[in-house]
Image (cartoon, rainbow, N blue to C red):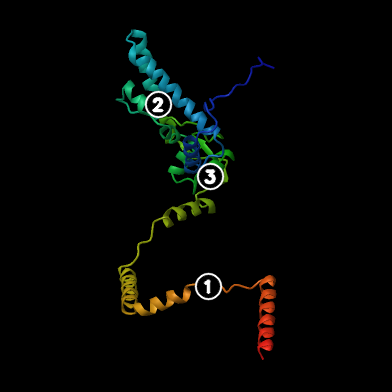
C-alpha cells in the first residue's frame, strides 16, 4: 500500500480573482504558448516566485552557508537553461514568466520544428510520441534541462519516428509556406495609378458630387391630418357656403 499522503496543489492561485490586467495577460499567454488551462501559467509562476524568493533572502546575508546556497541556486538555474554560466544572484530577480515558459517541453518541441503548431506539439507529447533519450515524457509542462535538450526526439515505438510519415512532411511544408509573399513592383505601380485617376476624376466634377449629395438628403415628410382636423375643415366649408347663400 505505501504511506498515504495528502495530495496538495503545486501552485498558488492569484490573490484577487478579478484583475483585468492579469486576466488579459493570461489570455495572451494561453494563445502564445498553446495552453489549455490557466493553472499551467500559475504553476510556472510559482516556480519563478520560489527562485526569486530564495534570491532575495540570499542577497542581503553574507555567510559561508549563504555562499554555498547561492552557488547551488545558480548551478540549478544554469542546468535548467534559465541563466548563463557567469550569472550572478542579482540576475535571478530579472527573470520573467516567459523565460520559464520557453523551457517547457511543449515549446521546445515546437521550436525544433517537430510539430506544426503548439497545440500539435502538446498532442504529440500526451500521446507518447516524444522522448528524451530512452525516456518517454507525457507532461507538456516538463521543464527541460540543458543536458536533455539535445536528446529530444520522437519515441522509437512511435509511428512518427519514420521520417516519411505524412504528418512530419506536412509540418515541413507549413514551415516553408509561412514566409510572407512580397508584392511585385508592377502591382504596386498599378495601384498607385488607379488611386491618382480616382482623385483626378473627383476634382474635375465637383458639381456632380454636390448633386449626388443633394439627392441623398431626405425630403421632409408631409404631415397627415387627423380626424379632428378633417371635421373642422368640413364645418368651415359648410359655414362659408351658408354665408354665400344668405348674401345671395
Picture coordinates of residue 248 (x, y %)? 67, 91
Marks 3/1: CA–CA distance: 60 Å
What residue is shown at x 57% (from left), y 46% (from top)? 159
Q: Earlier in the sequence, mark 3 or mark 2?
A: 2
- In front: label 1 or label 2: 1
Marks 3/2: CA–CA distance: 27 Å
Q: Earlier in the sequence, mark 1 or mark 2?
A: 2
Residue 135 shows in this picture: no
Where disc 1 sits, the SS reads loop
- In front: label 3 or label 1: 1
Vertical order, 156 against 244 (above or below) = above
Callout 3 environment at 10 Å: few (<14), some (14 to 19), or many (20+)?
some
Q: Earlier in the sequence, mark 3 or mark 1?
A: 3
Residue 42: mark: none
Q: Nearer the viewer, residue 11 or 104?
A: 11
Residue 151 shows in this picture: yes
The N terminus: image quadrant? top right
Picture coordinates of residue 246 (x, y %)? 68, 87
Residue assigned mark 1: 220
What residue is shown at x 44% (from left), y 75% (from top)? 214
- In front: label 3 or label 2: 3
Residue assigned mark 3: 119
Image marks 1 and 2: residues in contact by CB distance under 8 Å: no
Seen in the image, is 199 located left or right of residue 137? Answer: left
Picture coordinates of residue 17 (x, y %)? 55, 31
Residue 79: mark: 2
Callout 1 environment at 10 Å: few (<14), some (14 to 19), or many (20+)?
few
Picture coordinates of residue 169 (x, y %)? 49, 53
The answer to which image quadrant residue 97 occupies is top left
Marks 1/2: CA–CA distance: 80 Å
Amino acid at each position: 500500500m505505501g504511506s498515504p499522503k495528502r495530495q496538495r496543489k503545486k501552485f498558488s492561485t492569484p490573490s484577487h480573482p478579478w484583475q483585468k490586467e492579469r486576466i488579459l495577460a493570461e489570455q495572451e499567454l494561453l494563445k502564445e504558448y498553446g495552453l489549455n488551462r490557466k493553472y499551467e501559467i500559475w504553476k510556472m509562476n510559482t516556480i519563478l516566485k520560489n527562485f526569486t524568493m530564495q534570491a532575495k533572502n540570499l542577497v542581503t546575508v553574507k555567510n559561508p552557508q549563504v555562499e554555498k546556497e547561492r552557488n547551488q541556486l545558480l548551478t540549478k538555474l544554469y542546468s535548467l537553461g534559465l541563466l548563463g554560466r557567469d550569472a550572478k544572484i542579482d540576475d535571478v530577480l530579472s527573470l520573467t514568466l516567459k523565460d520559464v515558459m520557453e523551457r517547457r517541453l511543449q515549446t521546445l518541441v515546437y521550436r525544433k520544428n517537430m510539430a506544426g503548431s503548439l497545440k500539435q506539439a502538446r498532442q504529440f507529447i500526451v500521446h507518447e510520441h516524444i522522448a528524451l533519450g530512452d525516456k518517454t515524457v507525457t507532461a507538456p509542462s516538463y521543464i527541460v534541462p540543458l543536458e536533455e535538450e539535445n536528446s529530444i526526439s520522437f519515441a522509437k515505438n512511435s509511428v512518427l519516428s519514420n521520417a516519411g510519415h505524412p504528418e512530419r512532411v506536412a509540418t515541413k511544408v507549413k514551415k516553408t509556406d509561412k514566409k510572407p509573399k512580397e508584392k511585385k513592383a508592377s502591382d504596386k505601380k498599378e495601384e498607385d495609378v488607379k488611386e491618382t485617376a480616382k482623385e483626378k476624376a473627383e476634382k474635375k466634377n465637383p458639381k456632380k458630387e454636390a448633386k449626388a449629395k443633394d439627392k441623398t438628403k431626405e425630403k421632409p415628410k408631409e404631415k397627415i391630418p387627423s380626424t379632428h382636423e378633417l371635421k373642422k375643415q368640413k364645418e368651415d366649408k359648410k359655414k362659408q357656403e351658408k354665408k354665400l347663400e344668405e348674401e345671395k
